[in-house]
């Protein structure tokens, strides 16, 4: 115990720690229409998250590898680590900052471990697995871990700023650009399985549906100002619609892997990459309802809501409205492929049930099922997914706004002295110290909805013709080298 206390104290002293700007709990006003479990106060939901985080940190946050206070998320309770878990941890710590007093120090330790284990193909990506701190089973990268790591770095930038020992924003940009370069197929705009997939190889025209982390892609677009991320988003939704229409019309379920992306996309066959259930709704695909729901909750994309509610409707019928009947895996036609149940499935189904606004009882019941799982009976995967799902369900999952990513935190505050925009019902009020401004309004797919040239210190913009939803407002005056972007929700 003395050793642990000393290490925590040393970490605090060794890091340049800054106050957080988005302390837990955040109580985010999600943009999409949704429900939360009833019978719980907001304080109850917050405590469920913080209590579970305490358990998670004790078991899975490890510091026994390497020097320089490296931290990693344990895959097995010991010295095994996968980049997927490192990405989860690098999201969890910024989201829990404010409750966790050492969040930035722990995060910096996770970052140092990630940097100490680079992919041999692209050093800005992470080698996918280590045991006893050494790379095993190849030193190349897996896309999902890198995607979450990049997002975690953006959360860190917004939470603590990038003026300390680590320039989180620049590191995030480096990782995002590496993902676009080596983990995105530029012929199909699909997410590759990892940086090891090469053009002409057996896996070049395949993708893993659990890598459709669309809310991250939208933020990446803002961070690096790269509209190619719009192509990736649209392709993800196109593939989802294709599978749900042609292969899982009754269930809405997605397979772990999709193949033939260059011709006629379809679910993978058995043993395509990992095992018998590569073409089924198994331990990869079980995350899909959670990942799609967060896109709707943060950005209001109706494509996400439609896809998730297809799964919701099937699941209620399949289980006879009894979450105890949920099983850990299904064929795309709804047949069960397992006899047991697991929080890794129930958690994402619970997040998805937040969009089923016509059935509060179903959400309440499936949430009770999720809470019934004992932490001690779970493993790294189920316990970590449960924690992330509780953060979403409680209303404490947030994303960086575009204006927070364009420059540093201090620069953002300075930019607001030049110009700012406020939404009030059917109008935008633009306040500026500049004589002239260009205003552009985008939807989240990058489509330009309005362009205007503004004169004067305050200008009123009528947006009565714009539907409710989430939009990006950009103001610029290039003579003054001024650029300001803001994500806004019109209610």
Image (cartoon, grey):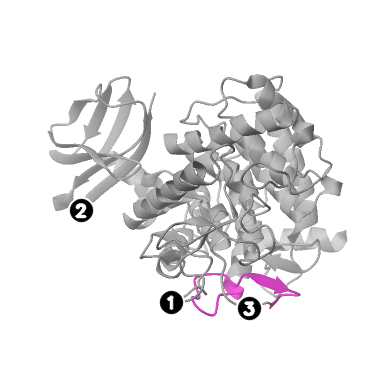
Image quadrant assignment for residue 71? bottom right
Circle 2 crowding by C-alpha within 10 Å: few under 14, some 14–19, many from 20? few
**In the rendered view, does 380 fall on the left or right side of 224?**
right
Query: Which one is nearer the viewer's eye here, 371 or 18?
Result: 371
- Residue at 71% x, 19% y: name it: 39
Magenta stretch holds residue 97: no
Which residue is depicted at the point 57% across and 19% down? 358
Q: Is residue 97 visible?
A: no
Give the magenta-colored segment's residue range. Answer: 115-136
Image coordinates for residue 25, horizontal then vertical, percent: 61, 35
Residue 118: x and y in percent read: 56, 75
Residue density around tag 3, few if under 14, some if 14–19, many if 20 or more, within 10 Å: few
Between disc 1 and disc 3, whose residue precedes?
Answer: 3
Q: Are marks 1 and 3 in contact (CB under 8 Å)?
A: no
Cα gap from disc 1 to disc 2, whole angstroms: 44 Å
- Which of disc 2 and disc 1 is earlier in sequence? 1
Query: Is 167 left or right of 103, judged from the image as shown?
Result: left
Asked if one can make out residue 267 in the rendered structure from this viewpoint, the answer is yes
Which type of secondary structure does the marked residue at label 3 adopt?
Answer: loop
Q: Give the main secondary structure, helix, strand or loop, of the magenta stretch.
A: loop
The image shows residue 200 at horizontal and vertical percentages of: 43, 76
Q: Residue at x 52, y 64 (%)?
A: 165
Residue corresponding to mark 1: 200
Going 55% across and 34% down the picture, which residue do you hit?
310
Residue mark closest to the camera, 1 vs 2: 1
The vertical placement of 46 against 341, above or below, is above
In the picture of the structure, the residue carrying the numbered disc 3 is: 138
Single out the mark in the foreground, 1 or 3. 1
Give neighbour class at mark 1: few <14, some 14-19, many 20+ (Cα, 10 Å): few
Among the two numbered marks 2 and 3 on one chain, the one whose residue lies closer to the N terminus:
3
User: Which residue carries the number 2 mark?
Assistant: 481
Cβ atoms under marks 1 and 2 closer than 8 Å? no
């Amino acid at each position: 115990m003395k050793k642990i206390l000393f290490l925590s104290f040393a970490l605090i002293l060794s890091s340049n720690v800054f106050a957080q700007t988005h302390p837990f709990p955040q109580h985010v006003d999600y943009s999409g229409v949704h429900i939360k479990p009833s019978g719980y106060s907001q304080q109850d939901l917050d405590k469920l998250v913080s209590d579970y985080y305490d358990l998670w940190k004790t078991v899975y946050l490890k510091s026994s590898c390497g020097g320089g206070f490296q931290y990693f998320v344990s895959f097995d309770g010991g010295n095994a680590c996968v980049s997927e878990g490192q990405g989860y941890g690098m999201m969890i710590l910024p989201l829990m900052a404010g409750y966790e007093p050492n969040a930035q120090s722990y995060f910096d330790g996770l970052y140092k471990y990630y940097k100490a284990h680079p992919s041999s193909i692209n050093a800005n990506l992470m080698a996918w697995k280590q045991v006893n701190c050494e790379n095993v089973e190849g030193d190349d990268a897996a896309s999902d871990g890198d995607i979450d790591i990049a997002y975690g770095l953006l959360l860190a930038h917004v939470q603590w700023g990038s003026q300390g020992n680590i320039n989180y924003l620049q590191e995030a940009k480096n990782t995002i650009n590496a993902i676009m370069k080596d983990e995105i197929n530029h012929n199909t705009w699909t997410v590759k399985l990892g940086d090891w997939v090469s053009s002409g190889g057996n896996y070049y025209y395949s993708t893993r549906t659990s890598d459709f982390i669309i809310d991250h892609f939208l933020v990446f677009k803002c961070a690096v100002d790269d509209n190619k991320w719009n192509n990736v988003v649209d392709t993800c939704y196109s593939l989802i619609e294709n599978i749900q229409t042609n292969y899982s019309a009754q269930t809405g379920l997605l397979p772990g892997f999709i193949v033939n992306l260059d011709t006629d996309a379809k679910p993978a066959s058995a043993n395509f990459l990992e095992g018998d259930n590569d073409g089924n709704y198994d331990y990869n695909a079980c995350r899909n309802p959670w990942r799609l729901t967060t896109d709707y909750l943060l950005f209001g994309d109706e494509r996400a809501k439609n896809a998730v509610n297809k799964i919701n409707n099937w699941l209620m019928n399949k289980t006879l409205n009894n979450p105890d009947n949920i099983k850990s895996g299904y064929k795309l036609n709804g047949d069960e492929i397992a006899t047991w149940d697991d929080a890794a499935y129930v958690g994402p189904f619970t997040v998805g049930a937040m969009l089923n606004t016509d059935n509060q009882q179903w959400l309440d019941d499936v949430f009770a099922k999720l809470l019934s799982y004992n932490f001690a009976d779970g493993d790294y995967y189920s316990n970590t997914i449960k924690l992330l799902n509780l953060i979403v369900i409680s209303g404490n999952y947030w994303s960086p706004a575009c204006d927070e990513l364009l420059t540093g935190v201090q620069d953002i505050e300075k930019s607001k002295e030049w110009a700012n925009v406020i939404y009030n019902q059917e109008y935008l009020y633009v306040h500026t110290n500049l004589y002239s401004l260009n205003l552009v309004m985008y939807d989240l797919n990058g489509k330009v909805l309005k362009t205007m040239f503004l004169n004067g210190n305050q200008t009123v913009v009528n947006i009565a013709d714009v539907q409710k939803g989430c939009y990006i407002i950009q103001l610029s005056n290039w003579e003054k080298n001024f650029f300001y972007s803001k994500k806004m929700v019109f209610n």
